[in-house]
Amino acid sequence: MLSLQTVLAFFSVSVLLALSPGPDNVFVLVHAAQHGVRAGVLVVLGLCTGLLFHTAAVALGLAALLAASPLAFGALKGAGALYLLWLAWLSWRAPTGLLEGQAAQGLSALQTYARGIVMNASNPKVAIFFLAFLPQFVDPGLGPVQWQVVQLGACFGLATLLVFGGIAALAGRFGQRLRDSARAQQSLNRAAALVFAALALRLVWLG
């Protein structure tokens, strides 16, 4: 069992990391501004669910295997980039006039939630980051390492939920003003498409 001091220290660092600019919080910001608070929160929940995948990968040693296989790492990055490019295409062609809280581009709540899962789970850099970050707070003398990794992953997920949820709420409310204008919403959709395309290129070329 992790000590309270370790948990508080890890949670503080996790909040700072969630606040630092990165693909996931940019994805949340753009998605919430484009489609509303509800869609943004659903994507956040999906991203946090994706973190469970990466936590399990570290706990089971899969992340180490992924890091040791350039082919597998490259394939996963390629899949993530293609997914982002697909989102860019959908955003570019998205119709205007969506109502506040309407699911993104006609997607159901479950599909919007799944979009967040895919966005996070298809990013191999998150798994490698977890592999490097989580063990720093593990103490083998406190019990099974796998269980400690699970606790740390849950703690990181909570920090992410709070920070990204706040981003979704603020961006969704600000974006409502833009969505009230068809022309402004079209500009927002085009801007979102460019952001998604840039994230795809960043994932492939910046590693």
Image (cartoon, rainbow, N blue to C red):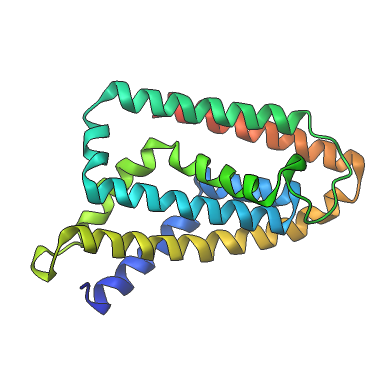
Residue 170 as seen in the image, left or right of residue 55: right
- In the rendered image, the quadrant that contains the N terminus is bottom left
> In the image, what residue occupies the spot 90% across and 51% down?
180
How far from the left and from the top, in percent, is residue 98?
A: 85, 46
Query: Is any part of residue 118 visible from this angle?
Result: yes
Quarter that holds the C terminus = top left
For residue 114, above or below residue 177? above
Location of residue 122 in the rendering, given as x and y in whole percent from the top left corner? 45, 36
Q: Judge by depth and name the residue closer to the eye, 124 or 113.
A: 113
Q: Position of residue 15 (x, y in %)?
A: 43, 63
Q: Specify whether 137 is left or right of 77.
A: left
* Residue at the farthest bottom position: 4
Picture residue at 25% right of the left edge, 59% below the top:
149
Q: In this rendering, is residue 51 above or below 187?
A: below
Q: Residue at x 25, y 72 (%)?
A: 6
User: Can residue 20 be seen from the camera position used here?
Assistant: no
Residue 5 found in image quarter: bottom left
Q: Looking at the rendering, which quadrant does residue 85 occupy?
A: top right
Q: Residue 168, located in which quarter of the rendered image?
A: bottom right
Q: Position of residue 48 (x, y in %)?
A: 48, 55
- The answer to whether residue 168 is above or below residue 24 is below
